[in-house]
Amino acid sequence: MKRYCLNMGWLMLAFWVWLGAAGLAQPATNALVWRAAQERVDADLRDWPLERVLKEIAARSGWQIFIEPGIQPTISAKFKDLPLGEALPRLLDQLNFALLPQTNRPPHLYVFRTSLQEATQPVRVTPGDANAAGHDKLIPNELIVSLKPGADIDALARALGAEVVGRIAGLNAYRLRFKDEAQTDLARRTLAETPEVQAVDNNYFIDRPPGTRQVLSTSLGPPQIRPRAPGDGGVVVGLIDTAVQRLEGGLDAFLLPGVSVAGEPAAGGDLTHGKAMAETLLRGLQTVAGNQSGVRILPVDVYGANPTTTTFEVGRGVYEAVNQHGATLLNLSLGTEANSPFLFNLLRSASEQGVLIIAAAGNTPGTTLTLPAAWPWVIAVTAGNRAGQIDPWANRADFVDLVGPGTSIVHHDGQAYYVTGTSSATAHATGLAAGLAETKNKPPAEIEAELRKLLPAPAKTAP
């Protein structure tokens, strides 16, 4: 269990108190939306202190930022979908700045009036600062509605003027879309007073995991482990990710028929993140199980052809894996800073059913509160070495449980690729846990204890 379970409990309590006090969601104003993959920015800032702006940029981009001491303007800016080169001057009040790439670490952003050499004061991101970054993931004009048994979602949606765009029938949970903000707010108030309604939650975007790069040369081939028939109650790993393509080296027999909750995957033959995680997981499995295993991987595609997924789709993927296909382990090499009670309750329920859940801590340096990794019943994995020293680009927050190798070599269409991130560290840890679950035949708490013998905890660092 995590060292800070009480803190997370208070976090969820605070969220529900806020929800009850607010009564309805506030419009997404006075916010900074940072789409790192596309290098585009939206902003609606009113009199923000420069320090706050820089902390928000650092929390989202992963950059290390240094400022010339004594600069204290307030920033007001409003724009949409600007490239970084145009957004930064407006976010920095026309101050001078330089964004410099670094070797094997995040870029450095220097902000100054006189000269770059004067930008010596680091901008430090605290957990509270990073937690604010989840607000820009809110999906406007959508609600997740959970109903009591016997309630009719279609009749309710018609009465509200909503479209049902997602269903988890076994949970009586539904994704509703409204035409505008006013209709959404009215529906939220109405639903709060409707006896058939069990819960109303926001829906949030979750970014697609980062891609891979080709390796010029390597002697490392695919894992050499071979599948054998699973025994009774065999270990099934739910891989909640993008689609998984055919595995190299005869490893396809480890894959169960895949589940998609977000439509057809993207067209094209490029290596998917899901496939990279599946091969990484099998390499970890081989470390424990040897040259044969009855473990099976259930690919659950929660992205389809979309650039993002949502907390609703991830929750639906978790439900499908655990309740419909018998997954006993979950690998979540993805994360968000948005706090979703809907996903929180689903994963807690899975844990209570005896499912071991392993999730990525995130690739933002500092102490970002990444979910679901930070929740108490989830094993959070960051990237680093065997001594527990965390890679400079990886999350080092207090909720991190284990440190795994942050780089893996995977194969696709005869070419080797490498993937870097806490995603890889998580898949490796899940492979180890799957091997332990198969060979030790112990309950989840004991498997977690055995896993902690194979991977180090984060090394203590001097304050």
Image: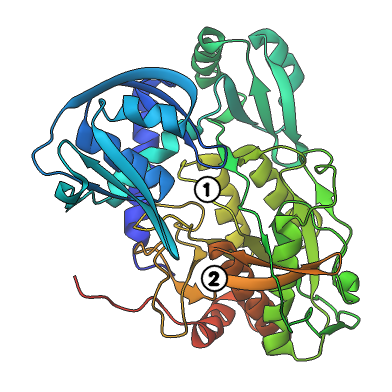
| Residue lying at 80% horizontally and 76% vertically, measured from the top left | 234
Residue annotated with mark 2 = 406
Residue extending farthest to the bottom is 290
Q: x%, y% of residue 148?
A: 65, 32
- Tell which of 343 and 370 is nearer to you: 370
* In the image, residue 144 above or below residue 249: above
- Tell which of 242 and 435 is nearer to you: 242
Residue annotated with mark 1 = 344
The residues bearing labels 1 and 2 have C-alpha atoms spaced at a distance of 26 Å
What number of labels is visible?
2
Crowd around label 2: few <14 · some 14–19 · many ≥20 (10 Å): many
Residue 47 seen: no
| Residue lying at 44% horizontally and 57% vertically, measured from the top left | 374
Closer to the eye: label 1 or 2: 2
The quarter holding residue 74 reads: top left
The quarter holding residue 4 reads: bottom left
Secondary structure of residue under mark 1: helix
**Three-letter code for the amino acid on which mark 2 is drawn:** Gly
Residue 179 seen: yes
Q: x%, y% of residue 215?
A: 69, 69
* In the image, residue 111 above or below residue 383: above
Q: x%, y% of residue 153?
A: 72, 22
Q: Quadrant of the N terminus?
A: bottom left
**Three-letter code for the amino acid on which mark 1 is drawn:** Phe
Q: Is residue 445 left or right of residue 114?
A: right
Q: Quadrant of the C terminus?
A: bottom left
| Number of the label disc, if any, that sits on residue 316 | none
Secondary structure of residue under mark 2: loop
* In the image, residue 306 above or below residue 158: below
| Residue lying at 57% horizontally and 10% vertically, measured from the top left | 180
| Residue lying at 40% horizontally and 39% vertically, measured from the top left | 133
The quarter holding residue 158 reads: top right
